[in-house]
C-alpha cells in the first residue's frame, strides 16, 4: 500500500484556467473599450451565502505573483495566486441564457452553489 500526499503549491504550478473562444472574444471587446486596461484578472473573494464569488477585473498590469496566461491573439488572463487553488481547472465561457449574455464558470472544485448562482463553495 502506498500513501499519496497532496501539495497545493505543487499542484497549482502546472494548473490552468481554460477559456472558450466566445469568452476570449468577450474579454477582447472589454479590453478595447478600456483606455487603461491591458489584461483581465481573475480572482475570488468571500461573498454570498455559499462562500466565494468570482471577480473579473480589467487591469493595467498584474501583480508579481499572478499566473500569466496568454490567450488567443494576445489577450492576457491573470489569475490571482491566492485564488489559484480554488479556480484550478475552471472553464470560463461566454454564454447566452434567454436574452442575456454572461460569463459562465464551470469549476470542478465547486461543490455547491447558492440558489441565485452568485456564490459557490469548495468544501
Image (tube, rainbow, N blue to C red):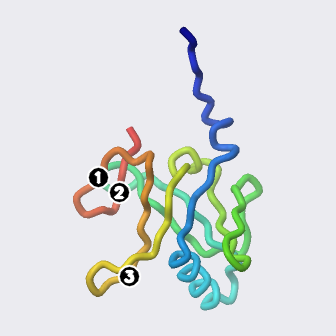
Q: Nearer the viewer, residue 33 or 96?
A: 96
Disc 2 + disc 1, Cβ < 8 Å: yes
Q: Nearer the viewer, residue 48 or 74?
A: 74
Residues under labels 2 and 3: Cα distance? 18 Å
- Sequence order check, earlier mark of 3 and 1: 1
Query: Image quarter for residue 1?
Result: top right
| Residue farthest along the top direction in this orientation | 1
SS for callout 3: strand
Q: Would you say 112 lies left or right of 94 here? A: left
| Residue farthest along the front direction in this orientation | 1
SS for callout 2: loop
Q: At which x and y percent is residue 120?
A: 36, 52
Q: Disc 3 vs disc 1: which is toward the camera?
A: 3
Disc 3 + disc 1, Cβ < 8 Å: no
Question: In the rendered image, which residue does mark 3 sit on?
Answer: 101
Q: At which x and y percent is residue 33?
A: 60, 91
- Of the 4 image quadrants, the one containing the C terminus is top left
SS for callout 1: loop
Q: Disc 2 vs disc 1: which is toward the camera?
A: 2
Q: At which x and y percent is residue 10?
A: 68, 36
Query: Image quarter for residue 9?
Result: top right
Question: In the rendered image, which residue does mark 1 sit on?
Answer: 49
Query: Image quarter for residue 28?
Result: bottom right
For the residue carrying disc 2, how many other residues have a C-alpha within 10 Å: few (<14), some (14-19), or many (20+)? many
Q: Is residue 32 above or below residue 67?
A: below
For the residue carrying disc 3, how many other residues have a C-alpha within 10 Å: few (<14), some (14-19), or many (20+)? few
Q: At which x and y percent is residue 53?
A: 42, 58
Residue drawn at 63 percent across, 58 percent down? 79
- Sequence order check, earlier mark of 2 and 3: 3
Residues under labels 3 and 1: Cα distance? 24 Å
Question: In the rendered image, which residue does mark 2 sit on?
Answer: 119
- Sequence order check, earlier mark of 2 and 1: 1
Amino acid at each position: 500500500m502506498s500513501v499519496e500526499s497532496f501539495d497545493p503549491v505543487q499542484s497549482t504550478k502546472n494548473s490552468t484556467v481554460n477559456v472558450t473562444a466566445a469568452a476570449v472574444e468577450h474579454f477582447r471587446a472589454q479590453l478595447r473599450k478600456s483606455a487603461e486596461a491591458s489584461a483581465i484578472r481573475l480572482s475570488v473573494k468571500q461573498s454570498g451565502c455559499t462562500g466565494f464569488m468570482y471577480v473579473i477585473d480589467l487591469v493595467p498590469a498584474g501583480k508579481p505573483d499572478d499566473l500569466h496566461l496568454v490567450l488567443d491573439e494576445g489577450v492576457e488572463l491573470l489569475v490571482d495566486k491566492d485564488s489559484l487553488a480554488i479556480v484550478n481547472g475552471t472553464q470560463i465561457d461566454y454564454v447566452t441564457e434567454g436574452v442575456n449574455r454572461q460569463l459562465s464558470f464551470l469549476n470542478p472544485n465547486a461543490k455547491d452553489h447558492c440558489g441565485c448562482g452568485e456564490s459557490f463553495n469548495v468544501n
